[in-house]
Image (cartoon, rainbow, N blue to C red):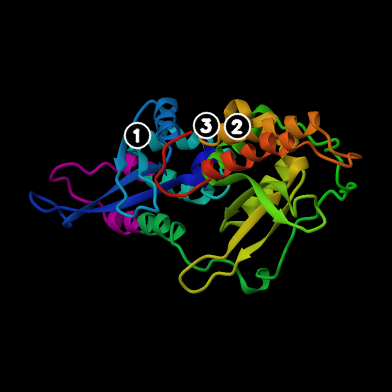
Amino acid sequence: MAGVIDGEGSIFIARVLVKSGYSRRGFFYKAFLSVANSNEDIVRRIREVIGMGFVGLTIEKRRDWRDKWEYKGSPSVLRGILPQILPYLIIKQEVAKTMLRYLEFIESNPIDGSMKVPEGYHEKLDSLYLGVKRLNEKGRDVPGDQLALASRPVNLNDRRPGNRFKAFRQMSEKECAWLAGVIDGEGSILLSKVFNRLYRRGFFYRPQLEISNSNRAFLIRIAETIGEGTVHRNKKGDAATKTRWAYIASAGVLRAVLPQILPYVIVKRERVKKMLEFFDFIDTHPLWGLKQVDPSYYKMLDPFYLTLKKLNKKGKQTAI
């Protein structure tokens, strides 16, 4: 759950205007937990795991955007879930802490009906609201001296073609569940078609795991959890957008990680299974040393690439 909320969630306080009826200030604050995704299954699973809240659908007008499902939980949901996931949050940890302070303040200072408002009450309330809002703001947040390409050291085992993964760390159950949530929300499992005239057909398929986010520490934590891969700057931000960082890993990481997270993956489950089938196929049909390749080999190989490409396609589509 922490992985999903770090990747796809929003912990925020809405400022709700009062259109009619009595209100001291003409508005009130209401706290929410929101998780949006184009996959209905993961959103409904979140509702099932938490046990409270509701799920709604937003129809996108743009044809290249998928319709989005959204889970929303109220302050009671936040009170119950945040203390449980706080130790595992990375990106949203500070906003979760501030939200818990907000919830504790309003619970210990109830104001009902015509009760007199204690001195300093609104100032404290506004301060907590602005604190949550500030932590959720978009825009540049990376200091200039951190904008240089900054890759995490990698395990420089022999990378020659044909080598297989060696001695990857085995993640704990909690780490597997957290990483599965992250990949469900932010990850891409794909086969890239890389053109190179030295190969028989002029190209080859490269398995990759990519996770993009504006929080570099979050991606470094992913690399540390897996024990392999690199983190680098993907796109420099400006006054209106945050700098984007990317974690990238290739076949060896996928071979080691995917079997560990498969039981916990929801949105990317079919992609994980298809990639594992791809690895099984190329392992059981080795080409090393062959002077000629039977054309039936490529007829069996290419569908893996096409299926993953379709599963990763953006925009409105039917599930495979």
Q: Which mark is residue 266?
A: 3
Secondary structure under tag 3 reads loop
**Which residue: 76% across, 31% down?**
170
Q: Tell me which numbered mark, 2 or 3, is placed earlier along the sequence.
A: 2
In three-dimensional space, the C-alpha distance between marks 1 and 2, rounded to whole angstroms, equals 24 Å
| Badge nearest the viewer, 1 or 2 | 2
Q: Which mark is residue 76?
A: 1
**Which residue: 15% across, 54% down?**
24
Q: Is residue 259 visible?
A: yes
Report the front residue among 110 and 286: 286
Q: Is residue 265 left or right of residue 145?
A: left
Give percent across and percent down for residue 130: 37, 59
Residue 82 vertical position relative to residue 220 in the rendered view, above or below: above
Contact between labelled residues 2 and 1, with CB atoms less than 8 Å apart: no
Q: Which residues are magenta?
A: 103-126
Amino acid carrying label 2: it is: Ala
